Amino acid sequence: MSSIKTLNQYGLAADDEVTYGTFVVPTPASDGVLPAEQPEPAYDYLYDGARGRGPMGGQLSGVGVTGRGMTLQMLAHQLLPGAAYSAVLQPSLERLMRYCGFATTLDVTPGSESYILAPESAGFDSGSLHIWSMHELWAMAGAYGTFGIEADGPVIPMWTFDFQGIGNAIHTDVTPVPAIGYLNATKAPQKAVNIVLTIGAYAVGTVRGFEFSLNRDLSARANDNSAVTHAGFTPGNRAPRLTVTMERELTATFNPYSLMEAGTLQNTHLTIGSAQYSKWALAMATAEIMSVEKEEDGNTALWVIELEGKNSTPQLQDDVVFTFD
């Protein structure tokens, strides 16, 4: 007989919350978000129930843990519809990006439909998640998160979401995973092939890989007035950073050291894919070079350049913008 609980079935469904932290049961048939690997939910309690050391040298019995928080790491590929964007034809990870502090703008101009996701600092969307993992069903309420994207070479960029929320209930055993409807599930994700990367006026010649991190802060909230005792999380600041590994250039063509020393802002733009409705772009219109490191690959000299997105004015929220068109 095989193991009772295995790793070969998993899934995820997410739905928008009306009231933060009030669980909305996702509908598997319509709310699926396709993971690239096994999701990893876990509990993270506010208080471990420990009483400390007793008078005879041992430990006193605890009082039970309280404040059931949850964490979730989910890896995914961005799947695009390959057809004109609409209210029902979206980027596959649009919903999760909103839970990470982005606001969506849908442009339905015929022939140039697009989704634009830009940061917001209030009125955040939150999610209720059902996670099927290891023949168990986990439920997270009040999900907020942050994410990163990585491509090391000409591969499919991997999106990594890190969510924090409230453990809505203790997980239960479930077999099998239900039939889940995943958006754009029949479409292949774009590879980091023939990408376009510009840093200011310089079109980067040979890119070896890139890594983006939103770096969004979240802080837990306790609520002693409630039997649940965990009130969820408060989103904080973000510090979007794009790290690019590239072959070194003649400094007369591109000199990242002088740009870094001068604090010169760089309009930085990265595009993955080329066909309409099957491409996405990351833009940091006023990015600043924060560090330059020298590396090597065999006989090839490389730079690893880290840029941080800045808001163009104190009142705007344009440090990083994603466009799907």
Image (cartoon, helix red, strand yellow):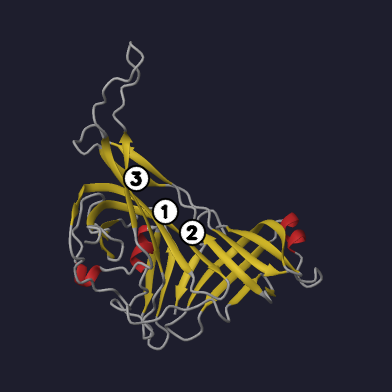
Q: CA distance from mark 3 to mark 1?
A: 14 Å
Side (left or right) of 150 relative to 141: right
In this view of the protein, can residue 6 be seen by the observer?
yes
Which residue position is annotated with label 3? 233
Name the disc covering residue 297, or none. Answer: none
Mark 2–mark 1 contact, CB under 8 Å? Answer: yes
Residue 282 appears at what percent x and percent y? 52, 69
Farthest residue, direction bottom: 111
| Mark 3, other Cα within 10 Å: few <14 / some 14–19 / many ≥20 | many
Q: CA distance from mark 2 to mark 1?
A: 8 Å
How many numbered circles does the render carry?
3
Residue 111 vs residue 255, the one in the foreground: 255
Side (left or right) of 175 relative to 314: left
| Quarter of the figure with residue 17 | bottom left
Name the disc covering residue 121, or none. Answer: 1
Q: Can you say whether 142 is above or below 52 in the image? A: below
| Quarter of the figure with residue 2 | bottom left
> What amino acid type is highlighted by mark number 1?
Ser
Q: Earlier in the sequence, mark 3 or mark 1?
A: 1
Residue 267 appears at what percent x and percent y? 62, 68
Which residue position is annotated with label 2? 317
> What amino acid type is highlighted by mark number 3?
Phe
> What amino acid type is highlighted by mark number 2?
Gln
Which element is circle 3 on?
strand
In this view of the protein, can residue 319 be seen by the observer?
no
Viewer-side label of 3, 2: 3
Q: CA distance from mark 3 to mark 2?
A: 21 Å
Q: In which quadrant will I find the N terminus?
A: bottom left
Q: Earlier in the sequence, mark 3 or mark 2?
A: 3
Farthest residue, direction front: 1
